[in-house]
Amino acid sequence: MTARCFSDYKDLIEEGDLTLIWVSRDNIKPVRMQSEETFNTRYGSFPHKDIIGKPYGSQIAIRTKGSNKFAFIHVLQPTPELWTLSLPHRTQIVYTPDSSYIMQKLNCSPHSKVIEAGTGSGSFSHAFARSVGHLFSFEFHHVRYEQALEEFKEHGLIDDNVTITHRDVCQGGFTIEKGDTTSYEFTNDEAAASLNANVVFLDLPAPWDAIPHLDSVIATEEKVGLCCFSPCIEQVDKTLEALEKYGWTDVEMVEIQGRQYESRRQMVRSLDDALERLRDIKRHKLQGVERRKRMFDNTIDTSDEKIEKRNGDGIPLTEKAKFNPFGKGSRIKEGDSNYKWKEVTKVESEIKSHTSYLTFAFKVINKSRDEEQVNEILQSMDKQSKD
Amino acid sequence: MEPLTTIDFNQYVIVRLPSKNYKIVELKPNTSISLGKFGAFEVNDIIGYPFGLTFEIYYDNEESTDVGKTDSKPKNKIPIGKVRLLSEEVKDESNDKDDSPSEPPLSTKEKSISVELSNINSSATNQNLVNMGSKAQELTIGEIEKMKQESLSSKEIIDKIIKSHKSFHNKTVYSQEKYLNRKKQKFAKYFTVEYLSSSNLLQFLIDKGDIQRILDMSQESMGMLLNLGNIQPNGNYLCMDETGGLLVYFLMERMFGGDNESKSKGKVVVIHENEHANLDLLKFANYSEKFIKEHVHTISLLDFFEPPTLEEIQERFTPLPKEEARALKGGKKNSYYRRLRWYNTQLQVMELTGKFLYDGLVVATTLHLPTVVPKLAEKVHGSRPIVCYGQFKETLLELAHTLYSDLRFLAPSILEVRCRPYQSIRGKLHPLMTMKGGGGYLMWCHKVIPAPEPTSEVTAEVESSGATIGEHDAKKQKV
């Protein structure tokens, strides 16, 4: 059995743990700790045995070969959000701004039983698995199913609260029966799994073909939430048609925009300083002109040589302007404490301007109440108040 | 009954009104609830139905329901009606709140047109529609008020209003729909009962105009905060919440799903800047007092950073052996147990502020973040996330710069997430013309443990060459 590396908080890095090694923001590598292995970067090698036994979050430093420099990595425990940044892409993935909104909108909690189709790269599956009671994931691509199954097993998700099934849900619906290609473990007298889902997420090219199959697998006694994730507006249009036809209501369609900012600094350069600098330049220029004039007029006597520098031809040198409040010409590091800085934000140079449209809808299958039960409750309350 | 999915007694629920406003009500047995101009209903009549259903309030002619009811408020003049489930067809397009100008007409009339309009002529364009304001309506305000007082059903009133509208047939079918929806928002007598989720509570507070109190939070920012914070049922989280408990409620709902029976051991430790924590909004939460006591602890900033020592606590109080305590009488006994509670709380404060390391830090405060966050983060375990919510990007920016220069924090980032709502009518899909601004920003980073200082000779060299590489380098380029 594999440890639940995503959902249990671990203190120390142990042999066999799946870790995420943070080299830089866009270089996060999943690495399983094996004491005889090393983790190689272009800056040097990090033996796993130097990592094992340290607390999670430890920075590991090595001295690079040859040059006497240091290289660092950080060893982190996987979380679904870090996994999303590091995972091997099998398909286009659902990023955190979208997945977190969907989870919040559908009120995901340990009470949720979720259907997800398809599994894809499993990015969203990990986030669901962390937060919900059970996840039933469906993938129609056989190789991707195998890969996801293997990955979920390694991450301890299958042993915990995830079931993955190989299925084209548009064709075959969501019912999981004995004999299906699935990670579901049937009990002896069980012919089909009871999904009873109250949250449905459809990331499919044609969700309208899957929607008719939902009624037999969603919870009947409570409000069920559905989200369809489609990049094209035409897909949304066809989805809306199917939702209306199959009795889904409270339809809402939204788009999520996530942005990330870099924290930067810009030098504070005042008008007064700019003016003063120009004055300074002007002053030096005039001095230079004057000196040259004096030289050509042959009015310079030798005693002047002591105070005036000259170049090889005996022409007096003009001193460089001295007032330099902005470090002109020299390379100033952002944040150099000799200068004044204003903190600023800069948006990423490339932003995800469109991921997908999120179409939400809700359905309550059984809209009645158990009159008998309600009467019983009312009567027992009456009794209590009389007693 | 299952209180998470079914409307149950003694529960707070949120009621959505035709005006799109929200109301939080407590469902006390044998009482009635007034929704103002939308009518009033008996609590007992809706118990046992699943959440998410829409009920219509109707009145049959034997109008006497509000007479002789002892528990309805005396000043309540709104007659209490009966309720029935609203049939699907009458339900309005819930997202047609767009006030865009009339759309170009489509060639075919859509099937999904409201039943109220099915027998009414419409125009292909608005060519013949002349704006004559209120003159188009032949009914006077007085007449409409009279109908309302006669407790006619909303359908009857709206039918009459439409019939008395002189140029209604000159409107396009879309504009007729919009007109109908506006009238429904005014006269319809129906309501939807929803579970009081964290998002619904937030929506309620936004509607109520409490934007400042909740620091301009949005559902999308909170969802992102919960995911980035890696909030789990068994985690122990350090939290500052200046919204009166909204953030704590978001955490609790994600951790326990409203379930009083949850066996999860997770805890939220709330650090507060006043002598007492303000978690007012938790009064709407349907968790028992016992459950909240077990899973939410509050510690003042002072106690957190300068916790009492065992000696100090024991100096003021030492518990008696159990038999002796039981033998105490009357007032003495009460005061003993009060002091015992104090003693236990103090011991708990010691435990929660001692060597204990938390699984995450989640902050929504207007205190100066660069002074607060690094101090609180000392109690956060390595590799665990720190997420700060801020109404303004600038305060988070200052924090990000501070954390960036501190090796205990990995890759502080400032994030923004916005949800753009669309009109979701087939053939007329477009973003809504207006949406709520604001929603705040998040700072996200991970607590890490810097490697020990390199040996002195090497330090000198590294410093002189300025050539640390790896993440340090990447940080410089990226952050």
Image (cartoon, coloured by chain):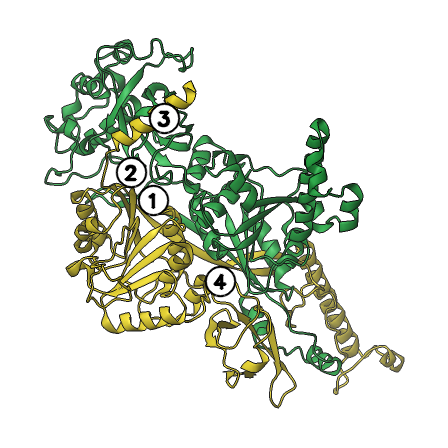
Q: Given contact means CB atoms under 8 Å apart, are the residues at marks 4 and 1 in contact? A: no
Q: Given contact means CB atoms under 8 Å apart, are the residues at marks 3 and 2 in contact? A: no
Secondary structure, mark 4, is loop
User: Relative to B395, is B90 above or below?
Assistant: above
Q: Colour of chain A?
A: yellow
Residue A84 at what x, y percent from top left? Answer: 41, 65
Real-space CA distance between mark 3 and mark 1, rounded to the nearest whole angstrom? 47 Å
Q: Given contact means CB atoms under 8 Å apart, are the residues at marks 3 and 4 in contact? A: no
Residue B421 is tagged as: 1
Question: Does residue A248 appear to the left or right of A19 in the view shown?
Answer: left
Q: Can residue B128 be seen in this view?
A: no
Q: Which of B410 and A304 is in front in this view?
A: B410
Real-space CA distance between mark 2 and mark 1, rounded to the nearest whole angstrom? 9 Å
Residue A358 at what x, y percent from top left? Answer: 31, 51
Q: Colour of chain B?
A: green
Q: Name the residue under label 4.
A: A8
Residue type marked 3: Ser
Q: Name the residue under label 2.
A: B95
Question: Does residue B321 appear to the left or right of B153 in the view shown?
Answer: right
Q: Given contact means CB atoms under 8 Å apart, are the residues at marks 2 and 1 in contact? A: yes
Q: Name the residue under label 3.
A: A380
Asked if badge 2 and badge 1 are on a common chain, one would say yes
